Amino acid sequence: MGADINRRFRLPLVTSLWTNWGRNQTCAAEAVDHPGDESELVASVKAAAAAGQTVKAVGSGHSFTDIACTYGRRLVLDRYAEIVSVDRQRLQVTVQAGCTIQTLNRKLAELGWAMPNLGDIEYQTISGAVSTATHGTGVRLGGLATQVVGLELVTGDGSVVRASADEEREVFACGRVGLGALGVLSTVTLQCVPAFNLHAVEEPMRLDHVLENLDSYVEDNDHFEFYYVPHTGWTLTKRNNRTDAPVGGMPRWKEVRDKVLFENVAFGVVCRLGRRRPSLVPRLAHLAPSGGRLDYVKPSHRTFVTPRLVHFVEMEYSIPRAALPDALVAVKDFIDRSGMMISFPIEVRFVGPDDIPLSTAYGEQRAYCAVHRYVGEPFEQYFRGVEAIMDPLGGRPHWGKMHYQTAATLAPRYPEWGRFQAVRRRTDPDGRFRNAYLDRVLGLP
């Protein structure tokens, strides 16, 4: 399908292969640019227009969909990843689109600042994370895109649009979760907060107990999440709360042991064993809750994020918060009936409402249910089965994670779908930023 899109412009003559982190998406581009400043970013978009090419920006490749794929001109943002400016009075920082969350976290820590909420992976570029509605957990906080207070967008003709709540308000409203469909993000300005520590308590709990007491866990903690371990009755829970207490409770050797050796190296061995001999998975799954309780205090950015060294593919759905218990039980029953052996825990998080048109948390508190399969394992039966459970609940798929929806099925789930499409027609009237994924999920521009 991607080749058909670009045939409208011109067939590629020279190819350069690109593969995402999950190793499930590969595409070949006719041209590859590494812009180093905004003028070079603009020049690349104009060059694509002159050559009749589509154009897509690529960050760290942590999306599992083909949202970043192009057969035209690829913009790799590895040279466009600096901190642009710091506003100490407003606690705001402006960064280039290729800046990773890891780099951002370190810079903010030097300033004595932090992001109010984060997801659990920091390898993504900030532009890719906000554009796909990436989020953490906590019903009194929104996703990363809600922390954006300004942005610069290179549109289809190479113009630079500066947008905020006071300037180009429609572009700002839609561009915070823009899917790369409105243009190429050049810079992002983020609202930060003073640095803070989190008191984390991680411990296994029975699934029935968690679901029976879910409202209190969600509402009585700043950040609550849990992982259901398939083929067991157990969950792994994590409660994070702001504290004035000093850092402590997890010495460096213990952090390496638990977060690197146990959760990555040992888990990777379990996944490989499960892939070779699926019948072992239920027995191996019972090892997960055996780690006991962890109780520690760390800076927020070190508490939110964890190393992810085991490669996988993922699907994640946002559903109304109240629907989560029944939905998760339905997923559990589906797995048990199917005969599939699932080695990856199912991740559950909770996010507050926002007003961003294509945000998966638009309009109400949402629960997020994420399912994974180890790289190389078949995933379609599992993912389609889970998606069938989420569909009647008005499920909104994470834009950067696998799903089988189309524009026709997605439009009714977003009350301001037409508002986004109007901005898209304005900023990309010629379809310069389209690709197979955007044609499927948004329709033709």
Image (spheres, helix red, strand yellow):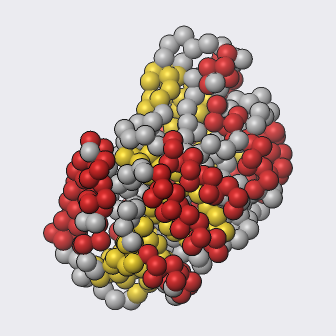
Viewer-closest of 244 and 19: 19
Q: Relative to residue 345, is residue 440 depicted above or below?
A: above
The answer to which image quadrant residue 54 occupies is top right
Residue 284 visible to the viewer: yes
Q: Is residue 268 among what the camera can see?
A: no
Quadrant, the C terminus: top right
Quadrant in the rendering for residue 104: bottom left
Tell me what residue is drawn at x 52 percent, y 22 percent: 29
The quarter of the rendered structure image containing the N terminus is top right
Residue at 54% of width from left, 10% of height from top? 13
Task: Give the percent coordinates (x, y) of residue 96.
Answer: 52, 48
Q: Residue lying furthest top in this view?
A: 13
The image shows residue 298 at horizontal and vertical percentages of 32, 76
Task: Say which residue appears at 67% left-offset and 48% top-offset.
Answer: 178
> Residue 162: x percent and y percent?
70, 50
Q: Residue at x 76, y 56 (%)?
A: 414
Classify 49 as above or below 354: above
> In the rendered image of this protein, does residue 294 appear above or below residue 49?
below
Q: In the image shown, does 355 or 34 lie closer to the viewer?
A: 355
Q: How many marks?
A: 0
Q: Nearer the viewer, residue 326 or 142?
A: 326
User: Would residue 185 be found to the left or right of residue 105 on screen?
Assistant: right
Q: Residue furthest left?
A: 253
Q: Nearer the viewer, residue 312 or 123?
A: 312
The x and y percentages for residue 149 are 65, 63
